[in-house]
Image (cartoon, coloured by chain):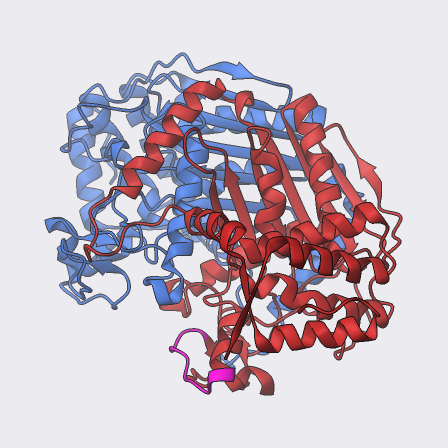
Chain colours: A blue, B red
Amino acid sequence: MNFITFSEQELREFTFAIFTQMGCNEADATLATDVLVKSDLRGIDSHGVARLSGYARLWQKNRINTKPNIQIIHQTPTTATIDGDRGLGLVVAPFAMQIAIEKAEKYGSGWVSVKNSNHFGIAGYHALMATEKDMIGISMTNASPLVAPTFSSERLLGTNPMCYAFPAGEHPPIVVDMATAAAANGKLEIAQRANKNIPEGWAQDKNGNATNNPNELKSGGSLLPLGSDKEHGSHKGYGLSATVDILSAVLSGANYGPWVPPFVAFLEPSKNPVGEGIGHFFGAMRVDGFRPIEEYKKHIDNWIERFANAKTIDPNKKVIIPGAPEFAFEKDRAKNGIPLIDVVVNDLNDLALELKVKKLS
Amino acid sequence: MNFITFSEQELREFTFAIFTQMGCNEADATLATDVLVKSDLRGIDSHGVARLSGYARLWQKNRINTKPNIQIIHQTPTTATIDGDRGLGLVVAPFAMQIAIEKAEKYGSGWVSVKNSNHFGIAGYHALMATEKDMIGISMTNASPLVAPTFSSERLLGTNPMCYAFPAGEHPPIVVDMATAAAANGKLEIAQRANKNIPEGWAQDKNGNATNNPNELKSGGSLLPLGSDKEHGSHKGYGLSATVDILSAVLSGANYGPWVPPFVAFLEPSKNPVGEGIGHFFGAMRVDGFRPIEEYKKHIDNWIERFANAKTIDPNKKVIIPGAPEFAFEKDRAKNGIPLIDVVVNDLNDLALELKVKKLS
């Protein structure tokens, strides 16, 4: 596996050109590019430009509308539901988060459920829009079914991530951004490519037996919820995933559970959908709706310092503040560039050829 | 271990008498009783009347104020912070949740952070106050430090539960009510009493080594976050627990992390507190702030039925809808009574003697 390193600017220009060729207007192409490239900058390679051709394939199948009429279809002063009109989640999600933020500016908090959307990139991007305004940001989405609830052999839930982002004072924000499965699908894909076993507790085969074989997922197996088995609390991971599914989809009118349409274009969506597209959920709360911001910042910094300096088991490993590794990546990659594996570069260049965009060199 | 079964009414009268003798007025004693007895009814024996003497011991040490002046100290239309004035959490929490509900009635949603409180019983009680009004209820609390963050040997977090409750149509509400640790402390206490080993992944000794010995917790060991180890996602359980801690305490001005005062009266609170008492966080969102309630109910019922009828690994085990076992317990115990183990009955009768209350017979 070889890596080729690109500057942030190169990847931005390339990605912008692809989205433009897909029919996005300038503002939407800029925004969608920012969401994807920020993911690479932050070290979350699985959700960055590596997914670009995935979005393009869905657009080619007319499952993504690059000229959406995104609108509020229901609201109160602090809640709203948005119809994403089959738009790119990368565009629909920031639109929805912006509405949550505006409601919070006026009333203290804002909450937005979204239907008829598509994959929204990293949850953290949207939640961090709130921390820039000294608000707590919340962001979640449902996703195509890969995870079996406790006791089941059926895939009924996505890896359904939830993200909570908290502004801090001297330190970067705390960002808890996590799939509610024991391990993300990306980790299994890495093991599949490397022909390696996976630890017990990540997946089960199609009959629900424990497995170390990452390929079982391709033949009817499932990922396991956070907690892995009942004895270790998999019903909690299942409950969290259910929470994300309900807030994102049952509340908005999107598809939920086994009906969520797949991200990959080669799998067809359900013929009998229970809603429209996939669903997201966003929230914003003003910190100063609870406490003067300076008091809060003093204490959140104290929290961070106490945890970062906690006694560790291995003296070479520090306790990690949620989100801190991603901020370190961002600093490094903005300066030193973003390494992409050659298979991703080849895939992007095939796409470039097809859409008549200048190749990555 | 012998069980003695009492009717709901007997336990209510006894508990009400104890709280009255502790100085609660009639309304507060009735409410605190309801929270504890509902826990027993719902089968969560660890958080019911078995804890009554724990509250009394804290009151005797002047760490619980049974005549609190609970008040809002900061607010916007949809957010508020409450000073619990060292009151019983069993009283402070429903007060706070009621304010969240009233704000939601007016503006669509309401969010309340609480400082200067004490143990609030089961999170589900408070969240269910919202579902009765066709709202989604959210409830969380921090708790005395027993859990080590990933990579640490220090106890820095409580078992910090979070609860999401969703109203349904024909079915009882979905209630996701979970400690963010791999296993609750109550499970270790059961193993300690029975002199049994615990599964790997629940606890570590004081140096951070894996252990099967439940007694390690008494000599400096820690519980592990949901996920158990890094490979299985313990950083996610740690992140969720941190989220509860920050929303409950950094936002309100309560103690957080290792400074949270212990529930047991024989352990002293920190001499250098960073806030007041323990903290809680509550939320309420009107379902019809997002979608007409009848549409939502049709789909949440469909969600429940699809999951309840999912294919299972063992044909004798059904997929459990979060909250369903507790509703089944409630139905059964309201009719057939509540079994208490003899050690709990003896403890309650010692307390009755001390506070001059008629014993349980």
Quarter of the image with the N terminus of chain A is bottom left
Q: Is residue B248 above or below residue B225?
A: above
Q: In this picture, which residue range is highlighted in magenta?
A: B193-202
| The magenta stretch spans residue B7 | no
Q: Position of residue B293 (x, y in %)?
A: 49, 21
Left or right side of A225 for A129: right
Quarter of the image with the C terminus of chain A is top left
Q: Residue at x 63, y 24 (%)?
A: B108
Q: Residue at x 10, y 50 (%)?
A: A219
Left or right side of A293 for A155: left
Quarter of the rendering containing residue B19: bottom right
Q: How many marks?
A: 0
Q: Position of residue A161 (x, y in %)?
A: 41, 45
Q: Position of residue A188 (x, y in %)?
A: 23, 56
Q: Viewer-proximal residue, B110 or B15?
A: B15
Q: Residue at x 32, y 57 (%)?
A: A183
Quarter of the rendering containing residue A85: top left
Q: Is residue B179 above or below residue B83?
A: below
Left or right side of A190 for A102: right
Q: Residue furthest front?
A: B361
Magenta region, main secondary structure: loop
Q: Position of residue A151 (x, y in %)?
A: 27, 55
Q: Viewer-proximal residue, A337 or A59?
A: A59
Q: Is residue B210 visible?
A: yes
Q: Is residue B259 visible?
A: no
Q: Residue at x 38, y 16 (%)?
A: A25
